[in-house]
Image (spheres, rainbow, N blue to C red):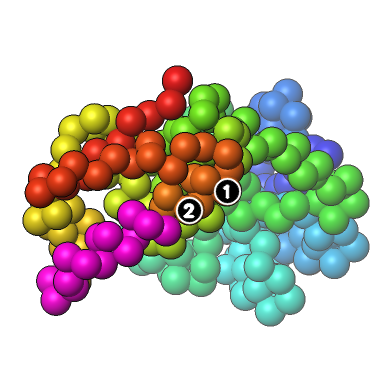
Amino acid sequence: MAAQILLLEDEQAIADTLLYVLRSEGFGVTHVRLVQEALAAFRQQPPDLALLDVGLPDGNSFDLCREIQRHSELPIVFLTARSEEIDRVLGLELGADDYVTKPFSPREVCARIRAILRRTRRPDPDAPPARPPEPVPPPPPPAGTLVLDEAAQRVHCRGEPLALTRYEYLLLATLMRRPLRIFTRAELMDLVWADAPDTSERTIDAHIKLLRAKLRERGLESELIQTHRHMGYAIRLPD
């Protein structure tokens, strides 16, 4: 639906120019020449924005602005031949969104109106609700018999994640990053249990035992994790 503009301007030549440009840009425009006419038009059908000349035969639009703002948060642009700073300050202090001094470019006025409406216009309550985005299906499990998924911090066994504790995952991931490389217990303590310096090296042996059991439950050889006597542990990844 086109945005509706209330134009209060008593000089017909200026009004005609603005009416032509605003309507050619797709706005709906109601034109009035007096403050009282503008107030009646506002009460009958509140617009999306008011473009108000300041000096008018039956008053000034500063008073109209006060009255409008008692009832709504309508965006307001003042349009005037006055260039004194006091008028600009008064208009802005009253809550105007912009202040354009004559002579002006009608196209610039349109651009300012569009910018204000982008900031202030509320969604149309009669518009159909936006469709929710289509759910994104989860990515397929990594291919392979035993796969390290570091982004998800998981290890997949034949397409299904292994149920691992934090330290089990860190230990298995450390081994899987360097297949066949022998890690000493001291290295594993530094890499996996860095935040638990009081942990005993026996903890490594206990976690290796648990990992072997979980791999065996999935039908893999428990000896994929190899013990190298007096040296440490390594993993041989299945094909």
Residue 199 on image: x %, y %: 18, 73
Tell whether position 6 is magenta: no
Tell me if mark 1 has few (under 14), some (14-19) or many (20+) residues whose alpha carbon lies within 10 angstroms of its own. few
**Residue 73 pos. (x, y %):** 66, 68
Q: Residue at x 75, y 29 (%)?
A: 26
Quarter of the image containing the C terminus?
Answer: top left
- Residue 196, by quadrant, is bottom left
Tell me the kind of residue under disc 2: Ala
Is the stretch drawn in magenta largely helix, strand or loop? helix
Quadrant, the N terminus? top right
Q: Which span of residues is magenta-colored?
A: 197-210
Q: Is residue 149 left or right of residue 189?
A: right
Q: Nearer the viewer, residue 201 or 71?
A: 201
119 horizontally vs 88: left or right: right
The residue at the point 30 percent across, 36 percent down is: 235
Residue 138 location in percent, x, y? 64, 38
Residue beneath disc 1: 217
Residue 125 appears in the picture as rendered: yes
Q: CA distance from mark 1 to mark 2?
A: 6 Å
* Image quadrant in which you'd find residue 39: bottom right
Task: Name the residue: 85% across, 67% down.
Answer: 43
Q: Nearer the viewer, residue 83 or 43?
A: 43
Disc 1 is placed on an element classified as: helix
The 10 Å Cα crowd at callout 2, few under 14, some 14 to 19, many 20 or more, is: some
Task: Tell me if residue 199 is in the magenta stretch.
Answer: yes
Is residue 101 at all visible to an observer of this figure?
no
Hey, what amino acid is under mark 1?
Answer: Glu
* C-beta proximity under 8 Å, tags 1 and 2: yes
Which residue position is annotated with label 2? 213
